[in-house]
Image: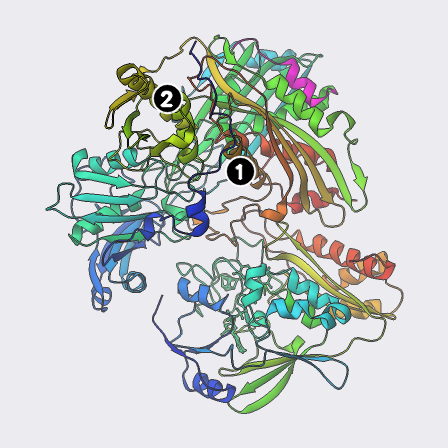
Amino acid sequence: MTELLEPRAIGRDMVRRDGEAKVRGTATYAIETPVEDPAYAHPVQATVARGRVTAVDTSAAEALDGVLVVLTPSTAERLASVEDREYAVLQSDEVDFRGQVVALVVAETSEVARQAADAVRITYAEQPHDSTLAVDRDDLYAPEQVNAGHETDTAQGDVAAAMATAHATVEQTYTTAMYHNNPLEPHATTALWDPAADVPLTLWDSTQGVHPSRSAVCGVFGLEEEQVRVVCPFVGGGFGSKGNAHAHVMLATMAARAVPGRPVKLGLTRQQMFTLVGYRTPTIQKLQVAADRTGRLQAIAIDVVEQTSRIKEYAEQTGVPTRMMYASPNRRTTHRLAALDVPVPSWMRAPGECPGMFGPEVALDELADTLGIDPVELRIRNEPGVDPETGKPWSSRNLVQCLREGARRFGWADRPPPLHREGAWLVGTGVASSVYPTMRQATSTAVIRYEDGRYVAEIGAADLGTGAWTVLPQIAADALGVDAEDVEVRIGDTRYPVASVAGGSSGTNTWGSALVVAAREFRTKFGHAPADGDEASGDVDQASTDEDHSAYAFGAQFAEVRVHADTGEIRVPRLYGVFGAGRIINPRTARSQFLGGMTMGLSMALHENSVWDDRIGQVAKHDLAEYHVSVNADVGDMQAHWLDEHDPYVNAMGSKGVGEIGIVGTAAAVVNAVHRATGVRVRDLPVTLDRLLPALP
Amino acid sequence: MKPFAFARPGDVAEAVRTVAAEPAAVFLGGGTNLVDLLKLGVARPDRVVDVRRLTSREITDTDDGGLRIGAAVTNSELAADPRVRERWPVLAQALLAGATGQLRNLATVGGNPLQRTRCVYFTDVSTPCNKREPGSGCSAVGGYTRYHAVLGVPAALPDASAPETCIATHPSDMAVALAVLDARVQVLGPGGARTIPFAELHRLPGDDPSRDTVLEHGELVTAIDLPPLPAGARSAYRKVRDRASYAFALVSVAAVVAGGEVRLALGGVAHRPWRATRAEEVLRGGPPTADAVRGAMAAELAAAQPQPGIDGGNGFKIPLVTRTVVATVRDLTSGVPA
Ligand SMILES: Cc1cc2nc3c(=O)[nH]c(=O)nc-3n(C[C@H](O)[C@H](O)[C@H](O)COP(=O)(O)OP(=O)(O)OC[C@H]3O[C@@H](n4cnc5c(N)ncnc54)[C@H](O)[C@@H]3O)c2cc1C
Ligand code: SF4
């Protein structure tokens, strides 16, 4: 048990501290960093999916006025470490995926850099590539573990036996598409290498973590941490794609080291973001669900097939939520990977839970249909008393309350019958559950100092547009027992103490915990009348921990879908989410996170789809006119609500993290509503109108 | 991206002379399409000639009861014109169904019908494309064809490596409305002025997919003439797309119902806005009941060639465009507001 902070600033709807600068356009993003006399770098990308670079002709590029240097596999510096092959840029003539960077131009202007990049002539010895994900490949393998350190496979009881004898079963395959994170701000790095300076390398990088970014660069270039500073005050979204540094950060660094003393800007184009900054793997999910007459699950199993790249393994933990979501005596989860000639997949908002709650939550809807049980009720009947995976009690679990509260707000009890028609529209409603683990990272330190009559808290945290600038002062204020206005928080710079990545919805939990430790330390040392310059620090690992409970946030999402009877066009006029996510630090920023997640889930349901062209080994779409994300007109009455949840086990704030849970389950709720409206069960995302045409009146 | 010279001549004649004199010179309207293509390296002109302030930005009444629309009129201005909204609603609706408010504020009447295809291989210079690089082949055949043509393509599966193959669609919404309205295009070229019936402006790929229209190099669109519709005519534009807004058409229908006559043009189905003359002919025989329209569309689509491809191909366009035409004509004839 943790002693929860007495909420005074916490829980208040406070305006975003970075809001005004962003609205006025004065917030500087990485590419806009005001540096003197910048040069510009532009990558040249491979046009074959597998092979070898046999010749690079840079003469035409180098002949252009304003070209400073062209880096190629034969001219680029040798890196200290090439172990991570995503980062081992320009180190060999191997081409591992189409779009991989095979040369880099540095020039006086971005226009010349681009022109020169076009003028670099590359000759390839092309080899046949293999980029087709399929469930029946004979080279699928079990990774040692899956993302976030989870076990690859788990099994309990006998699923096959339960499937053979159960009253009702569902056995279906569901697929989610490949998705690209596509934050609004393209990935960018401004880099300065000044060998004579105390800190020779400075990177202004758009990142979800300045310290993780620094570690990656230090490893690759063999630099000491003291030699590198990473700065990132503002990020225009990341959704996981800025959680790890990607190849362009190494390229920007390399470019800067090639023109010492000269800052270099490298901004990826939207097109380049489709190959160089990660994506969510497509998933194939084979579900088996068995239940007795009353709907109680007898078995639940998910066998996942997904992809990774040949050069670097990333194993999305898609099967993980099935391990703990519902009670069932027999269960199985497996993950198998195909290592393909494809770009390196990575994190995208709620890795694991987001795709992994699609198949199961649609399968439950199918089961509810088969049994004639209301899908809300079916979920309630399978509520586990303790975590089925670990046997531990829950720190708090309010899924049932979320379902009931959501049903009440949505008017679920009075929902229209299947295949209901109103005018030109077929109307259906659907529900699905959401879940996201409550995490806290092991490293993060905060310093609190009394300065000019105010408290200054420093921690190298990142605000992706999520609210860290605003909620961290609220936490520090309550921990210090002062007003939030009296606390200034400084983040986004490796000059401040080490902080973990803004990922896994763990930022507030982690950095907030470090702040609380620092604040308590400060009060212990200096009492309530500190002197100017008094300073204390706190580490997250000094915060009390709880190993005895399973900690997750839960939620329920309800969708109303309308399908046009003439054309099959799909609209979602209502989407309601109710969440039990611990204590909400700031309702304004939290609501944005929930709604943002739900919108992205809606987008996954209806629009997003990185169509893979396996003939050439690349995504066919490469800009936002083609890669559709939901637009304002697609979003109707979208509401996020939360329970007043008190969880004494998670951390001193009582917070569970709200950044990711909103995207979990949404697509299933929409698909389930489409089924009710049209009778068509879509098991492969996205749901598009052509899938519904055959069933229209 | 390649450097180019930028010119802003004093009048249209000089603009025409400037472009005509240089094989790799192009006109610039609002730039919403051309500038993207410049950045992507798809358009590689030596000279860009800005005509936006040279052509007329006026919409004037003509003697026959129609309108003359200057080429520099923006898409927003045209859509908001009360005469257009009242007498040619199909045009206003088509404009408003296109792009976004910001883009429409920039896009011009001259530039809109001349925007290039949105074929994903056309805009990716790393892939073969006959339209962008004549003779290189067509990457779309057997590829991502969701937004590609079903009409006006050869009967057999097109040969991806043949230099004449192109299964792209024309993306403009406005052009579909102009096709159904029998608009005329006023053109000024190095050899003088001429008028082109709108339905003849765009071409099928034929043996040269790099050419979208019949315009010769150096020919400038100066205005578009809109003839009056018969008294009592009703018209509507119905666009079906993958999201609620800000998306190109999967299929679209521009329809005019006047007395016993039904006029139809289809978007998203061919290399040019597709005037459905066959269907119109069939419907001339009697009242446009749902069955009659369905039959007429069957005749129109008899030669359609759904394109297979990754992500399911585009065969759905056949039932989709049929259903959309049936619904649009139904709403126009039953008095339901479109
Ligand atoms: C993200 C996005 C979404 C869009 N969605 C839609 C949509 O849903 N529906 C739709 O219809 N359109 C859509 N558009 C396209 C938009 O309508 C066109 O880009 C616009 O109409 C082009 O007009 P412009 O004046 O900007 O042309 P420009 O880009 O200036 O020129 C286009 C072409 O016309 C030539 N040209 C321009 N003016 C003349 C002239 N007077 N005489 C001869 N040649 C000329 C140019 O050389 C160029 O080849 C979209 C565009 C974008 C970027
Ligand atoms: S369809 Fe036309 S535009 Fe598209 S790749 Fe083929 S030739 Fe090029």
Q: What crowding class fits label 2: few (fewer than 14 Cα within 10 Å), some (14-19), or many (20 or more)?
A: many
- The amino acid beneath tag 2 is Leu
**What residue did someone put label 1 on?**
A596
The verdict on a common chain for dots 1 and 2 is: yes
Q: Secondary structure at mark 1?
A: helix
> Which mark, by number, is residue A562?
none
Name which residue lies at 22% across and 44% down: A202
Q: With respect to residue B205, does A621 lie above or below?
A: above
User: Residue B92: where, in percent of width, then height?
Assistant: 69, 66
User: Residue A53: where, in percent of width, then height?
Assistant: 25, 52
Q: With respect to residue A691, does A534 lie above or below?
A: above
Q: Quadrant of the C terminus of chain A?
A: top right
User: Residue B252: where, in percent of width, then height?
Assistant: 68, 60
Residue A608 falls left or right of residue A382: left
Stretch in magenta:
A372-386
Q: What crowding class fits label 1: few (fewer than 14 Cα within 10 Å), some (14-19), or many (20 or more)?
A: some
Q: Nearer the viewer, residue A31 or A141?
A: A31
Residue A542 within the magenta-colored segment of the rendering: no
**What residue did someone put label 2 on?**
A480
Residue B186 falls left or right of residue B301: left
Name which residue lies at 33% across and 17% down: A520
Q: With respect to residue A113, does A52 lie above or below?
A: above
Q: Earlier in the sequence, mark 1 or mark 2?
A: 2
